[in-house]
Structures are given as C-alpha cells and as structure tokens.
Image (tube, rainbow, N blue to C red):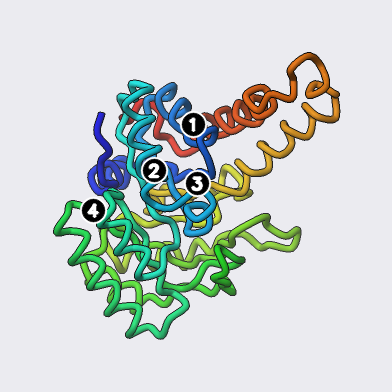
Amino acid sequence: MPLVSGTEFLKAAHKGGYGVGGFNTNNLEWTKAILEAAEAKKAPVLIQTSMGAAKYMGGYKVCYDLVKDLVDSMGITVPVAIHLDHGEYEDALECIEIGYTSVMFDGSHLPFEENIEKAKDVVAKAHAKGVSVECEVGSIGGEEDGIIGSGELADIEECKQMVATGIDYLACGIGNIHGSYPDNWTGLAFDHLQAISDAVGDIPLVLHGGSGIPLEQVQKAISMGVSKINVNTECQEVFAAATRKYIEEGKDLEGKGFDPRKLLAPGTKAVTELVEQRIEWFGSTNKA
C-alpha cells in the first residue's frame, strides 16, 4: 500500500471518537516494530522522524525510503503516513519535496506573527503536493531536538488564527510535556482543552508528550477532540530496558548472542508490544 497523508484517517478518527498514534522511529528495527504492530492491530499509523533522528539515520531521504520500502517489502495493508515531527521551517519544506506525506512545522518558539506567516507558506507548498500539515500553538513542555518549551496553555485566539491558515491538525499546549512526567505533574488541563476544541470546531487536535499520561486521561482527551497522540519516550524506555536485561543476563555472551540481530531483538519486540498496547488505548484497532 502506498504511503498516504494523515488528513483522511485523522478526520475519520476525529469523527469516530478514537485516536491514532504518531510513533517516532530511530532506525530500521523501530520502523519494522511500528509497522508490525499497526498491521497486527489493523490500525492506521503515523511513523514520525524528528530532526535529530533524521540526522542520525542519514537524512530525510533515507528515512522516507526506509519507511516506503518496508511498507512494500513487508506487505503492509494499513494506511501509513511518514510524518516530520517538530520540524523547523526549512526542514518542513525539504520533507515536502522529498516525499513525506505529513509534516509538522513547529514555529511555537517564534513570534506569533512569524509562526502564522511561515505556517501559511508551509500549508500552501504542502497542499500543492497532497501533504498534510500540523502546526503548534503554545509550546509543549520539555525539550525536543533543542526546542525547549515551558508547557504554557495555548491561547484560544491564537489557536483559531492558526487553524485559519488551513492546517490539517493542531498541536496545542494543554499542560503536556515531552519526556518523563515529574511526580508533581498535575495532569492535563481538560477545561482548557474543551475550550480549544469548542473554538476550533472539527479540526483534529494533537496530544504531544503522550508517553506517561495515564490511560484515563488519554481517553478523556480523545473524547474531547484529540485525534493524534504522539509516543516516543515510552518506546525508548522499553527498548532500553529489554536490551539491558538481555546483556545483564549474559545472553550476548552465549554463542553468537553478540550478533546485532539477536542483541536488538528483545528491544524491538518490546517496542512492538508497546505500540500494540497504545493502539488499543487509543481505540484505533481495526480502524484501517
């Protein structure tokens, strides 16, 4: 199945009251793990590359080719979008030209008027090629590829202005953060989420920092208009834990246990299992 934009299946999720996962990849193993999970659960999925991950993997062209070729060679039948996560303006334009089917231009750290003007340009260039666009208002707490957000609540009027640029889905700060949530985190600001949802109408909302948010809060957010949930940190954590266990048990010293295909297998399996579980959480099983 060819790669698709995220627009139609996220509109369907918004209308149907369920969420779709945006899972970040870092290499071949993670990409296969995400695709295997999505296929097993018959769920649409966005495979996301951050700017840092793309640099690590060899560039956006390598990331695009890897996802596209694995979808073909693995016989994947569910809708898959390849998405740029938290992209700078120039990165978003590069990904549009390369063939990404969905991009996030993150101008939340810029003066608002500059954010809006660049968003308009990204939307025009992306939509000309059938590429969906996500933009952000109110930075998400934590750090993502050097962009540090304090986690403020998104301004309602700014959300409305951003939606008016023609974007396909909106990321908005509602008390969520990237990375691990601290013990004193007070939870998502549901009153504010409801106000945003009421103000912007039927556009799908995006929940960044989806790792570590309790199930009941995730599902409540979905019921209030969130249609895309980003997951990255939890995948990193389970991958690291499974790999550590393999080495601490001395498996790498048994026979050819040092073979990277064996060494990375437990972590890869852990990522697949987590993605399958999160798909269940989000309600997108059998929604392909």
Answer with mark 2 or mark 1, whichever residue precedes in sequence: 2
Kind of residue at badge 3: Asn
Q: Which quadrant is the C terminus positioned in?
A: top left
- Against 215, residue 109 (above or below) is below
Where does the image place residue 90, in percent across and percent down from the top left? Answer: 35, 69
Residue occupying image coordinates x 30% and y 24%: 77
Earlier residue among tags 1 and 4: 4
Which residue lies under the disc numbered 1?
280
Q: Is disc 1 surrounded by few (<14), some (14 to 19) or many (20+) residues within 10 Å?
A: some
Q: Amino acid at mark 4?
A: Val
Residues under labels 1 and 3: Cα distance? 18 Å
Q: Earlier in the sequence, mark 4 or mark 3?
A: 3
Residue 230: give x, y in percent of width and height. 48, 50
Closer to us: mark 1 or mark 3?
3
- Point out which mark residue 90 bears: none
* Element at label 2: strand
Q: Amino acid at mark 2?
A: Leu
Q: CA distance from mark 1 to mark 4?
A: 27 Å
Q: Where does label 4 land, which residue?
A: 131
